[in-house]
Image (spheres, rainbow, N blue to C red):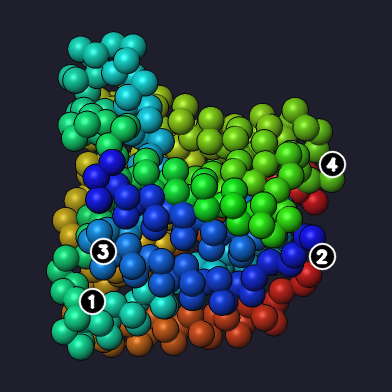
Amino acid sequence: MTATLGIALLIGVAFGVTLEQAGLGRARKLVGQFYGTDFCVFKVMFSAILTTLLGSFWLARLGLVDLTGFYVPETFLLPQFVGGLVFGVGFVLAGLCPGTSCVAAASGRLDGLAVMGGLFVGIGSCGLLFDRLQPLRASTAYGTLTLPQLFELPYGVVVLLVVAVALLAFRLLARFERPA
Amino acid sequence: MRRTYADPYLAGVALGLVLLASFVLSGRGLGASGAFASASASVAAAVDTEAVSANAYFARYLADGGFGSDWLVFELLGVMIGAAVSALVSGRWRAEVERGPRLGIRARLAWAFGGGTLMGAGAMLARGCTSGQALSGGAVLSVGSWVFMLSLFASAYLVAPLLRRLWR
């Protein structure tokens, strides 16, 4: 095992511990998100995004890291929109997403294992149908496109806007949450 | 002893630090669905090597050694180890099928499998899932990642009322 894969394993361990401690290995807790009883998914996800955004912004500001070394997924507008719609239906049916299905399975939940099996079959089948799906999958390509580039705003301003919107959303969530 | 879950905001900050560490140490964010793509590519290659080498989607996952040397496979293996240890230490490890009060075990497993299949298709089209696109791509402000995140939540909220029977 190379050093790179060793780091991958260690990062994964930390990822798994965090998700399990947050309770995100349990389908019934996750779907609370969609029925207004438990907004744990939003809270964890957006406080993680804020932490990474602010952390990377300040590390770059202080000259400690070079943000150009961070991989930014390329934008393919239509397939990412359509993929999101399909994924969302699957998310409610499964009650778990790919990462959390592994957490569920590893903590004994057999439904997590079933989701993992479904993922394997779903991705594998689409891989076999690659020639048919690729026209859609490769359409509306915008290359590496970020929100600051799209809105022609400085990186820091977009970071500030995302933080502001997320903090507002956290306050609203507290008002709408109706624990079961 | 069965301990309560961590505060979600605190867990989120911890997750953000893990994600930041991943970017700083490896230049990439966290992921999950890519490991399933790598696994399916390797299985397909074992069945029919020639057909798979002609398939650009699978070939990409086999180019640098395949399943046994894939960054995401090792990361996801770590996720499972971390989650298992965390659940054991916190007294939450239990062999069971999590399901809504009105759903039988078999039905729950079937829906879980079906949901996984749809998420697999969505992740293949979108080039990533909630981890690789929504979380990691979202944190580096990729436009496509935010589009995926918004459309997946919009879709989930639209269908959730129709699927109440599964969970409520």
Give yes or no for contact between labels 2 and 4 (Cβ–Cβ under 8 Å). no
Q: CA distance from mark 2 to mark 4?
A: 16 Å
* Subunit bearing disc 1: A
* Subunit bearing disc 3: B
- Report x, y in % for residue A152: 19, 79
Q: Secondary structure at mark 3?
A: helix
Asked whether B10 or A27 is in front, the reply is B10
Q: CA distance from mark 1 to mark 4?
A: 47 Å
The answer to whether tags 3 and 1 share a subunit is no
Q: Residue at x 75, y 39 (%)?
A: B96
Write down the residue under mark 1. A148
Q: Secondary structure at mark 4?
A: loop
Name the image quarter holding the N terminus of chain B: bottom right
Write down the residue under mark 2. A180
Write down the residue under mark 3. B25
Residue A65: numbered disc: none
The residue lying furthest to the right in this view is B102
Of circles 3 and 1, the one toward us is 3
